Amino acid sequence: DTLSTRALAARADALAAWLARRGVAPGQVVAAHLANGPDLAALLHATDRCDAILLPLNRRHTESELAEALRNAGARLLLHDGAAPRGEWEVERLPPPEAPLAGPPPRPARDASAPALLLYTSGTTGRAKGALLSHANLRASVEASARHLGAADDDRWLACLPLFHVGGLMILLRCAWQGVPAIVHEGFDAAAVSRALDEDGITHVSLVPTMLARLLEARGERRAPAGLRVALLGGAGASQELLERADKLGWPIAATYGLTEAASQVATRRPGAATDAPLEALPGTELRIVDASGAACAAGETGEILVRGATVTPGYWRDAAATARALKDGWLHTGDLGALDACGRLRVFDRRADLILSGGENVYPAEIEAVLSLHPEVAEAGVAGAPDPEFGARPVAWITRRAAHTPSAASLRSFCRARLAGFKVPVRFHVVRELPRTASGKLQRHRLVEPTPEEPA
């Protein structure tokens, strides 16, 4: 479906009036279990008109997972376009676009500090938490991204990320702020995305590394479309091999580090920079690196990444303890490990919770995964620590195959030994059909569990 700016505004007005008639009040949570498309885009603006809080639900979650989020959020209403979990919340199908306006749309108070979105974090380390993003957070993110990457009247974004994820939602908000088109796909299909990039005048696209890898595979040696200006790449760390391959084919990759709690982008490498260059903080965003005691690290030293600025969440929904742990003196403690260079540019290494301490050495799973991804018979790799009586923990790898042939553990071990220190070489390898990932493409290492002796590897 195609919606002009005027048609989108009219649809948002109609939905806002309908929500108000249903008794949705300012500050209440409206949940949405909707496919990518114009309905969700209109609802994003409709809840804004009602001063309500929009909770986009993950379409990949089970009914029990959805019910847990809905109960935690205290959702007033659940809107859906198909089956939806039942509970203490009202459940309604979204009214069709041709439904008449149910009275005048409400007049929003426009309190910039009021929450606009409730997004449950991807849960790479366990239970998801509901991060609040205010109207001010969203505006700051949109403006900072435009200043950092540039914005033009002929920009045309392709949204193939899920719109229940902050990366997808921010595309819609950037386009609304600029007054430029967003081409929304219902999901990621490499052939469809490739065709859209070639034929639809796309200037900007946002991807995660697994999407980029599949897109390059689908296109073979074809170069990036000439009109593409920015390919924002976030959600998870990309291997150097993937970045270099994309660069050689002319892809304007803008690798980014971001979080739901910071309204998406925190630091982004500009297109055209070297593929191994550090990331620059977005305008208005401050970065610090601290050690375990909270003391500031010197340039080049690894520690926890802290973020401060107008994009940072005011806190977690109904979770004062988690908010207090994450936000201290205005700084968001990300739990991610990185380092700043002398110019304040950022390198990101890994999740602190995923760090493997082996025989007194720090082992970063992402480094091993990047090496394994270079193996010609490995499509993807995940690494986690396993308890070890002598060393405390040792790295173990899970891989997916690139072709029908399964690489032997000996060949994988030899490949790693030629490129990694001995203590970083995985002690075991498991071949799996797929790796556990969030909707944004982040690897969920806490779900990498070795089979018991009775189970096949």
Image (cartoon, helix red, strand yellow):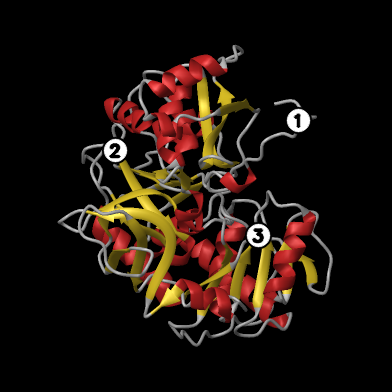
Q: Amino acid at mark 3?
A: Leu
Q: On the image, which quarter does residue 197 sit in? A: top left
Instruction: Determine the image quadrant of residue 20.
Output: bottom right
> SS class of the residue under badge 1?
loop
Q: Tell me if mark 3 has few (under 14), some (14-19) or many (20+) residues whose alpha carbon lies within 10 angstroms of its own.
A: many
Three-letter amino acid code of the residue under disc 2: Pro
Residue sitting nearer the eye, 381 or 16: 381
Q: Which mark is residue 252?
A: 2
Q: Residue 331 vs residue 261: left or right?
A: left
Look at label 1 and name its amino acid. Pro
Residue 151 in view (yes/no): no
Tag 3 and tag 1, C-beta contact below 8 Å: no
Left or right, residue 223 beside residue 440: left
Q: Residues within 10 Å of mark 2 (few under 14, many from 20)?
A: many
Q: Is residue 100 visible?
A: yes
Q: CA distance from mark 3 to mark 2?
A: 31 Å
